[in-house]
Image (cartoon, rainbow, N blue to C red):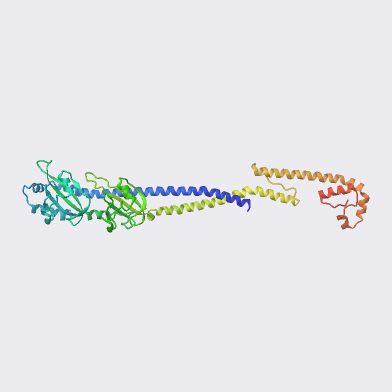
Amino acid sequence: MKIRTKLTLILLLASLLPVSVVALIARSTAQRALKQRIGASSVEFAKLAIHRINEHLHHHWDDVQTWALMDELVGLAEGNGGSNDQMSTFLANLRTTRHNRFSYLIGCDRTGRIVAASDAGLLGREFGDSRGFQQALAGEPNMQDVAYDEMARQYTLVMSAPIRDKADPGRVVGVFSCALDWQAVHEMVLDLNVRGQPQTLSDHVMLTDRDGLVISCFDREDMFKENLVAAGMQSAKEAQRGRRGYLVETSEHGLVALAAYTPWVSYEDLPNPGWLFVLLQDADSTFADMARLDRAILCVVIGTLACVLAGSFLIAHRFCRPVLAVASTADSIRKGQRDRRVAVSSNDEIGVLAASFNAMVDALEVATRRAEASARSSWPTCRTSCAPRCTASSALPSSASRDTPPPSGKCCSTTSKRSSRAEGRSWLC
């Protein structure tokens, strides 16, 4: 392998390592930045979605507080008169015309007996065993977690407020409760668009209770059956610990997804239900920009390597050209062109080599000329002292005279040998 090829390969390999390292660092940095940008925007999306749901719930929460102050309801709860039928009709109208998302609206006395209801069939039933009733009776408005309601025969979110005595506001005479149809909240969750598109199996929102039980999601089959914490989803576990963030993990459907998670955010005076919000987005689609970035980095690397290869070839050629010039000059001198010299174009090691080569050739030229001059100066003496033998040799045939040395005579023999080495002549004087 030529030294120029070796040098080109060495330079190429020496450049390949830093280029590869830079490309890997650039890709890792870009991927981290992209993941951070998408993850942060997903967390903000989750917070906005929670805010929207909280506004909806807070609207109903204010209604419950207001309705608990109605004089007719206070009178019924105290047992001081009033028509159960009239109040029940009023509540039924509220449910059907203005707030038809409620499964029922009921007013209870201190014992927990229903004295007014939007559904006449609920009058007289006991409601005192519910946790929400006990808290409201203690003067604490509350919102219970979503659960299956036997009276509504569906999943509801029950809000309760104390009914206070007008003369003594510190005295609670009853409890007013409303069961919000959970389907209303579930539809709000379904209406959320993920990346500008309706939710799918790979891109969807999951809402769970504080224990990780799914209470709303795209796949209705998972509602109130799938538990994300029990299933081992890290996003749900992190949200349960009160943290918000994002990570890449396998979803409940076995798909690799970018999961953004956050615990529920409190809103004004609305009780915090402690729910968990998880947003899942398909990893391949989410990081599609990363694939385009990979292609761009690959093109840059290939272009860089092409430039490095061309530059390495030029550097190797420039480095080897003076060496090749020395070799070419030496070959020309060997063939008899003793006036050839190497051009010295630099002061580096290659230039020193060329200058040394020229000095060596000059020294050899001086030595050769001195030898030739010495041979020419010895030639007349040789002819005089060796004339008889040279004459005898001249009588030989031309071919013999050229190839046969003189028969005797040290002077002629020695001089003619030196002369023949210097000028390439024959043994004959």
Residue 143 relative to residue 310: left or right: left
Which residue is painted at 62% across and 47% down in the image? Answer: 319
Residue at the far bottom in the pictured view: 221
**Label tally:** 0
Placement of 271 over or under 119, stated as above or below = above
- Camera sees residue 313: no
Residue 133 relative to residue 343: left or right: left
Q: Whole-percent x and y of residue 217? A: 28, 55
Using the rendered view, name the quadrant where residue 292 is placed. bottom left
The front one of 230 and 56 is: 230
Q: Whole-percent x and y of residue 410? A: 89, 47
- Camera sees residue 168: yes
Placement of 147 over or under 355, stated as above or below = below
Which residue is painted at 72% across and 51% down in the image? Answer: 331
Residue 339 relative to residue 230: left or right: right
Which residue is painted at 91% across and 56% down in the image? Answer: 396
Q: Whole-percent x and y of residue 119? A: 13, 56
Q: Whole-percent x and y of residue 218? A: 29, 57
Residue at the far right in the pictured view: 388
